[in-house]
Image: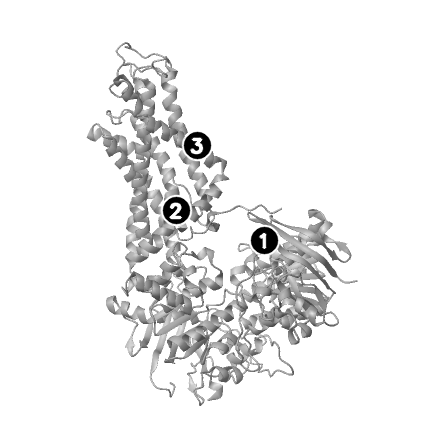
Amino acid sequence: MALLEVENLCIDYRTKNGYLRAVDGVSFSLDRGQSLGFVGESGCGKTTIGMGLMGLLPPNGFIREGRILFEGEDLVKLSPDEMRAVRWRKIAMIFQAAMNALNPVQRVGDQVAEAILVHNPGLSKEKAMEQVEELFELVGIETDRMRDYPHQYSGGMKQRAIIAMALACRPALIIADEPTTALDVIVQDQILAETRALQKEFNIGIIFISHDISIVADMCHDIGVMYAGQLVEYGSREEVFEDPVHPYTKALLSSFPTLTGQKADLVPIPGETPDLIEPQLGCRFCDRCREQIPSCKEKTPEWVAMGHRHKALCCRCEMGR
Amino acid sequence: MTEKTTTGAEVKGLQKYPWVTSFLEGWAIFRQSLLGKIGLVLLTMFALMALTSYIPPLIDPMYNPMTGVDPDITDSTGPSLKHWLGTDFMGRDILSQLLAGARVAFMVGVSAAVMSIVLGTAIGMTAGYMGRFVDTLLMRLADMIMVMPTLLVVLILAAVFGQLNIWTIVLIIALFRWPGVSRIIRGQTLSLKQRPFIEAAKVAGASHFRIIFRHIMPNVLPLAFLFMTFRVTSAIIIEAALAFLGFGDPGTVSWGMMLQWVWKTGHMFKALYWLLPPGICISLITLSFYMLGRAMDEVLDPRLRREDQTD
Amino acid sequence: MQDRPEPILDIQNVEKIYRSKGALFGARRKDVVALRNVSLKICEGEIFGLVGESGSGKTTVGRLIVGLEDVTAGNILLDRENITQLKGRALKAFRRKVQMIFQDPYQSLNPQRSVLDTVSEPLVIHRLGRSADRKEQVHKALKAAGLSPPENFFYRYPHRLSGGQRQRVAIARAMVLNPKFVIADEPTSMLDASISAQIFNILLKLRESLDVTQMFITHSLAAARYLCDRIAVIYRGKVMEVGSGEMVIRNPRHPYTQALIDALPKFRTRGVVKRYDTLLEKDRRLEATLTGCPFYPRCAVADERRCHREDPELKLLGDGHYVACFRLA
């Protein structure tokens, strides 16, 4: 059984101009020890997926449809209290700009200990501190820095402390939303390497959300490419990045400058992202698409299987099948 | 399923007049505020009162609020057909006085508020933008004025200079009421000063003058306008208090003045028909300006967070 | 420094120290050294990349050039004229020649002013042209920045524009004066990849059509490689390596540059990637000093006796490739 299975997830936001469908019919699954990456541009719904899985949607957001099966249990049906028990203990999250999530007037070690105590009420403070020590060793912070305050930490160390907090209850799934965006590349590289090692050691499933294709390509076994609330291409890292079929994936890849290989011209995607309150009929990408055919505008695209797990949401691919 | 509200922006042709669209957008938020709506209705009422105040003296000179005396009446009388709210101790019509008082309240409130806002905004922007010793100097001055009890100082001035003309009172209120505004505008200016668009203007070669008036001022004006409504409230209250204590302009019928007459002639609890109308009017008009301000606050929020109110 | 002819911009031994005001009680003064003896020459018509991590001082270089801050020591020459002490009329004349594109397009446009107001402002300030001519020039600048049709944007306000559109307006504002030199300070760090690529291509096109020299400040080596003719790598206020883009990226010689390239996720590469492994597992602990190589605490190949005592200077390795490292000398 898969660790996480999401079926036809739809998440709406109530806005003053009507309902905005931020996530539209997304399905995927993830096994323990595997990692799945979501890439896409801002506003494509990737962060909303993470928040939806954690049950932490903002007050105007709600899950309209779909199922989130986590270890066989549907999270959508849980009450807020039951969800609280699952959250953090079984599913942990590393937020975007998590470095600001630390309380500036409390020692870092105490904050991590508190996270442990909240979820293990029977534990003594000493026992918790022992666990914190272990965790700090695990994520590569010297244990004598436990008694320091957040402002004494560098950005990378704060991020490590956040990862330690996420690991505190040995979760089965971690959702990492742009975990290294604010960090310098050298520190980012170290943290990603440590995350990979920890994932292997504890057999954790990771959902990795980022706008940076190269990080996702580096970290994840499976990739989901998102556009305007929809998953448009899904498959293994090799399938999606070496042999992309959806025009959006191709366009995204060719707009990304690389360090290796020949210096090639970047091909930007023309235009802007579409309106999600009244999404257009047919394919949402067709106005910006280089490969569009007449039927793209009228026909709602359907999933086309390209390989073992590789699939794409595209009329053109449908035709070519 | 989807409820769509059309904002002005979607109306083609208005694009060129952005203040229309931003006004309509603001209005849409304003309309949702109950406080704002009540305040606006009340203010409209007072404005109508102020306008109609010109009518009674035209009907009959005895309805002139200051000089018109009903020849048949020698003491305060209750409401009658001829005098809907009754008359005061000299036989002057209370309704006409009340209407005239509305006019005076608006005049005093708005002009004192405008003056103090203009002064406060100019000083606040200068202090915030120039920084260093100019800032220190102006802000110390502001502090000094701010800690002075306005009413007391005005009373002393009145005692020294004798009877004050209504415009002098307005001026004094304005001079004592700018520091609060200037502190807030200064804070706003300080944060604007750091914003890249100010730096971009500098890089383009803009002078200090240009930066202050073209870039900083338009961004602090909404806040200044917001504070104007609160300043109106305080100006009306100060004027009423002065008049009640007997330091008002004897040539002007204001609500405070009416209260003073009630009190001085010993009708305080005998003639409720005389005491209540000006009292209620003062409370209501200050309340309605305040409610209007609160609603405007919501319109401006979250772009401009309201800082501590100093009154 | 280069064997090319006249540089248009010549940065000579520039130093920038932020002096902290001593607290009222207790004299814990700590000056922050933002730039240490930086020298760079930028040639006419090139796009010069300044690459560094956060806190490296790369933005400070840009701000010093446009005169938003003053140098602590050293000179900056534009067209052989020293620009560090300009005042009054000379400063205003200089402003016409050098412009800047800021990092955050959400902050760099005045929310209360329309696109037409914003882009025509430099023309108004420098009293160029009449109202109609100005409109014409704004039209041209917006078009060059890829906003079309330009007249549709004249009366729009920033909050009605997307991030990419805002940055184009900022580019048009910088270009409307036909400056000689433009500094682009991380112009795409707030934008999505596909929009960034649009902005990059506009900057490249502007170089072709207007012949404007550019300094591109970025944290991304990949973006610098795509856009720039030459690249300088800066770390903690010191220039570590200068050379042509391909040279610095394909054949980095400074251990810091090598560590940077090691750290970047390898993306769409097949086969084994060469690693330099110049980063220490654990930083050396030492007291903060102002001498020595700033990378010394993290450098795996450092000379323990020399690297933290002396300042390595930029040395020519040949073909315009300069590196500041003792190990190569």
Q: Amino acid at mark 1?
A: Ile
CA distance separating discs 2 and 3: 22 Å
Chain letter for the residue marked with disc 3 in the picture: B
Residue pointed to by mark 2 = B222
Q: Is residue A128 above or below residue C266?
A: above
Label 1: which secondary element: loop
Whole-percent x, y for residue C283 in the image = 55, 74
Circle 2 or circle 1, nearest the eye: 1
Q: Amino acid at mark 3?
A: Val
Q: Is residue B206 visible?
A: no
Residue at the far front: name it.
A294
Between residue A87 and residue B38, name the one nearer to us: B38
Mark sitting on residue C260 = none
Whole-percent x, y for residue A160 in the image = 60, 65
Residue occupying image coordinates x 47% and y 49%: B11
CA distance separating discs 1 and 3: 36 Å
Whole-percent x, y for residue A165 in the image = 64, 59
Residue pointed to by mark 3 = B41
Q: Quadrant of residue B280?
A: top left
Label 2: which secondary element: helix
Chain letter for the residue marked with disc 2 in the picture: B
Q: Quadrant of residue A258?
A: bottom right
Residue occupying image coordinates x 42% and y 63%: C150
Q: Are both tags, 2 and 1, on one chain?
A: no
